[in-house]
Amino acid sequence: MDNVVNRLIRYAKVHSESEYHGRETNPTDLREFDMAKLLVQELKDLGIENAFCDEHCYVYGWVEATPGCENLPAVGLVAHMDTSPDCTGKDVKPQVIHYEGGDILLNKEQNIVMEAAMYPELAKFVGQDLVCTDGTTLLGADDKAGIAIILQAVEEILAEGKPHGRICIAFTPDEEIGKGTDNFDVEGFGADFGFTVDGGDITDYEYETFNAAKANITITGLSIHPGFSKDVMRNALLIAMEYNGLLPPMETPVNTEGYEGFYHLLEMNGGVEKAVLTYIIRDHSMERFLERKAQMHKAAEMINRRYGEGTAVADVWDQYYNMYEKLKDHMEIVELAETAMKAAGIEKPTHSAIRGGTDGCMLTFKGLLCPNLPCASHNPHGRFEFSPVPSLETGVRTVKNVLSAELLEKIEFRKEK
Ligand SMILES: [Zn+2]
């Protein structure tokens, strides 16, 4: 029998960073196949002979229901194999450190220290073993801890021979750059509902995300020699600034938290003749999300009234939606997550509204309801990422519980097929 810590360490050492400006299709970097091939082999080693990796670098595998459990819902488990390009994932050297409190010396040679004052949540883990980096790379527990938890849970369930329904497993590429579900085969996957196992403190699960849109505002100006430009020039850059001035100044990421949405000016490019503003628009509430998108168009109309039709053109498109819009009619799936966490020893599971999205958003709107279970990655996307060992073990118990016949027998929900 393997264990979840060895698994995490083994997977963390595989360089599988995705690329913002990599290949157009999945995977954005071919090295992600290294991780995929390893996982297909490990699934086969567990006796899951049907495991395979497709040409887009998605790994799938299925465990059939135990006799008598064929009518239970088929539960999907999804984790992503790539790590964030924001911090290097090459030559990751994980180490297990017993945490006694205070600062943690990660790297003696380079004097890299994780300071307790900077990361107050460390206090929760005094007396525990932590899987850490050597301070020079990310750990990639986001989301390799998710993979480790899933495979460990499946190995244990198979070994224990306890009754379970059909288990559908998928590992995806390119989540970190927002392409994690582009080529996901929801139909072939065949789960009635699923869980992503990704990110976050092991006590916190998630089923609310932002609704998300992106917008390009193109401003067309009119250039003329500045010395002869009186009453003629229309400076696209100044008009772009005016456009931004028409949006509520306090509704930006730096001024908002919790359930407060925002407009975020992401990029601003141009000259006198032409300027383009790129925004992202976020809100948990669908109603306010629609209002925000309408506001982008209204501001463009206002500019056009001032400077002439066609001066500002707003191109707004949706990126993903709050999975709660779909899950609210099937809260038994969310309750299953919470019950499973409690049965794993978490006294009071919490759920926070994510100020972002997950692969589960896309999957939910592609027809696979998919809240998120935590995988105990702390300080993700950075050199101070770590994963507490007891949290990883709790994660394994949680996943075993969502697969158990005992809890699934109470779930009526079946996906329409
Ligand atoms: Zn992740």
Image (cartoon, helix red, strand yellow):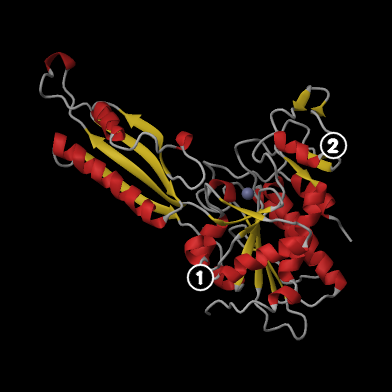
- Give how far apart the Cα atoms at labels 1 and 2 are: 43 Å
Q: Looking at the image, which residue sits at the far top? A: 227
Residue 4 visible in image: yes
Q: Position of residue 61 (x, y in %)?
A: 70, 68
Q: Looking at the image, which residue sits at the far right? A: 1
46, above or below 232, in the image: below
SS for tag 2?
loop
Q: Which quarter of the rendering shows the N terminus?
A: bottom right
Q: Position of residue 386 (x, y in %)?
A: 74, 40
- The residue at which mark 2 appears reads as 99
Q: Which mark is residue 217?
A: none
Q: Quadrant of residue 275?
A: top left
| Image position of 104 (left or right of 220) | right
Identify the residue at image location x=79%, y=45%.
388
Amino acid type of the residue tagged 2 in the rendering: Tyr
- The residue at which mark 1 appears reads as 329
